[in-house]
Amino acid sequence: MDMPPYVDDLIEAVLATQPNAIVVTQAGNPVSMPWRHSANTILHSWYGGNEAGNAVADVVFGRINPSGKLPMTFPARLEDNPAFLSFGSDNGKVYYSEDVFVGYKWYEKRKIEVAFPFG
């Protein structure tokens, strides 16, 4: 979930200089955002294909309203992710220790505060 080295430092430096900067992340899964409380606007753009740049520009410049909802929960910390507890290899077996409490249900059952909730 962590960004590549120094990316968080760069984002924090930009936000310290320009608090109204728009942070755009592009990933296929949740990413850690330790600077999220300093950012006024965060746009997670997923993988939009050939027209992703145009779509992000349309959102940033106000041509369209980004009215979508999150298809998954963004945990506040990597350690809060249910896979963190059982990650690793055990003779090629994968254990889904969260049982039926997958996705947002895991965080609700455990009363874990998240960065951004599902939906």
Image (spheres, rainbow, N blue to C red):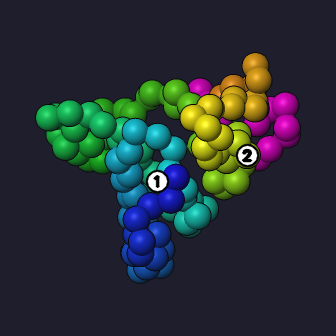
Relative to 72, residue 3 above or below: below
Whichever of callouts 2 and 1 sits on the residue coming sooner in the sequence is 1
Q: Foreground: 92 or 1?
A: 92
Asked whether residue 37 is in view, the answer is yes
- Residue 102 found in image quarter: top right
Label 2, secondary structure: give it: helix
Q: Amino acid at mark 1?
A: Thr
Task: Give the side of residue 104 with respect to residue 112, left or right.
Answer: left
Q: Work out which residue is located at the far top of the displayed protein and give it.
A: 100
Q: Give how far across and how far down residue 45 sits, in percent.
A: 35, 41
- Residue 14 found in image quarter: bottom left
Q: Is residue 106 magenta?
A: yes
What's the magenta region? 105-119
Q: Residues within 10 Å of mark 2 (few under 14, many from 20)?
A: few
Disc assigned to residue 113 = none
Labels 2, 1: front one? 2
Label 1, secondary structure: give it: strand
Q: Give how far across and how far down residue 35 sits, in percent.
A: 55, 66
Task: Give the side of residue 97 with respect to residue 19, left or right.
Answer: right
Q: Residue at x 19, y 43 (%)?
A: 53
Q: Residue at x 76, y 23 (%)?
A: 99
